[in-house]
Amino acid sequence: MNSYFIIIIAILIAHYAVDLIVDLLNLSVISEKLPAEFKEWYDHEKYSKSQRYLKETTRFGIISATFSTITTLIFVILGGFNLVDGWARNICGEGDIVTGLVFMAILMAASQIISLPFSLYSTFVIEERYGFNRTTLKTFVLDMLKGILLTVVLGGPILALILGLFDKAGSLAWLWCWIAVTLIQIFMMFIAPYVIMPLFNKFTPLEDGELRQTVENYANQQNFAMRGIFTMDGSKRSSKSNAFFTGFGKSRRIVLFDTLIEKHSVSELLAIIAHEMGHYKKHHIQKMIVQSIVIMGLTFFLMSLCIGNQNLFDAFKMENPPTIYAALVFFGFLYTPISMVLGVIGSAISRRHEYEADAYAVETVGESAPMIDGLKRLTVENLGNLTPHPINVILNYSHPPVLDRIRAIKQA
């Protein structure tokens, strides 16, 4: 039997098994006992609701992952990729780039159709049941259509460029792809706040008042140049809240969910914003960009090793000669274990950055209470998990658990 076929099936099953074990471990540590730190923030019913939410979302995630894994296994075993390749060739002929775009489009359309019922149930049943959902069916459909449009307009040319470079640039094709995609990625970081994000949300300058004045004074004290402070209509999709920065240099802008402003005091909002500023002041953004670029280079290099590998194509029951576009997809299966390892390392770095940003916020604001209260309120309003299993944290958490963050702030 083809060794690549055995490896790919093993990877799919192992990846599913790891996620399943972590989910079950996470469910096993759910306790009705409320941590002392949150006794003044949760009543019994509210905390019980957060536990039910955690159980339901975790179990639904298991069902979704099980269906996805079984579907993928059947598709691979029965030679589904060869069938799609035949459809793409019948539509476009033998041209690698155009045929590759159609091949990818068919796979993505199939994936979208398969995942759609799960997305609908998550949004309109689970999130609705726990009072989070504010998405209308119209907004849901428009978001999906806009996502498809962006994939076609932006993803299509980038994929065509990658296919073209691997076809024409020889043994250094991976290097040229790395350079090209890196430049595109950096360009997108600059234009996304002005071109892409407004397609999905409305951004409004924060009105004059105590909050705006407080934030501007703080930014001036920290010598933090920015374009402005904006509110985002996150409430049209969910009652959950957040805050973030976009842009670089003087084009940076602070964005606050309207739901965040509704629920938090001015001092808490300042602490949350100070935390986000801390990421810039500690150069976390630049470090994560460099990390992403390095990983992208490694990915393209490893991908180049799969181009033209006949044994790999035999594993997927491909009847036609190896193509670049199919090799990119098949490489994704082999890359899964590497991606998991890199994800664990990246999450560990991210969690450390969060501690550093918390410390920066407390130090520059001058007190810890607003930061702690802000974290608690965010957790309570979003029904966050107070006691995740440590293995779940290692594998999946880009932020430390809230109790760990509070403990670190108090110790500092």
Image (cartoon, rainbow, N blue to C red):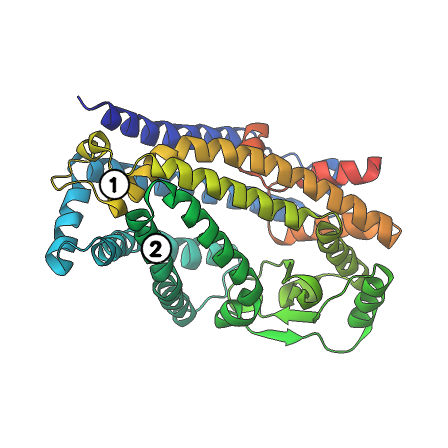
Quadrant of res 11: top left
**Which residue, given by chain and number where applicable, does mark 1 sit on?**
71
- Which is in the foreground here, disc 2 or disc 1? 2
Q: Residue 314: horizontal and vertical position, in percent?
A: 17, 32
Residue closer to the observer: 3 or 42: 3
314 above or below 124? above
Determine if residue 386 is in view: no
Q: Residues within 10 Å of mark 2 (few under 14, many from 20)?
A: some
**Which residue, given by chain and number where applicable, does mark 2 sit on?**
159
Residue 28: mark: none
Q: Amino acid at mark 2?
A: Leu
Residue for point 59% across, 48% down: 289
Q: Quadrant of the C terminus?
A: top right
Which secondary structure, mark 1?
Answer: helix
Q: Amino acid at mark 1?
A: Thr
Q: Residue 129: horizontal and vertical position, in percent?
A: 48, 55
Residue for point 57% across, 64% down: 190
Residue closer to the observer: 222 or 304: 304
State left or right for residue 229 relative to residue 311. Answer: right
233 above or below 156? below
State left or right for residue 161 relative to residue 311. Answer: right
Determine if residue 25 is in view: yes
Q: Residue 265: horizontal and vertical position, in percent?
A: 77, 62
112 above or below 26? below
Q: Residues within 10 Å of mark 1 (few under 14, many from 20)?
A: few
Q: Quadrant of the N terminus?
A: top left
Q: CA distance from mark 2 to mark 1?
A: 25 Å
Residue for point 73% across, 67% down: 226
Q: Residue 213: horizontal and vertical position, in percent?
A: 82, 71
Which secondary structure, mark 2?
Answer: helix
Of the residues under marks 2 and 1, which one precedes in the sequence?
A: 1
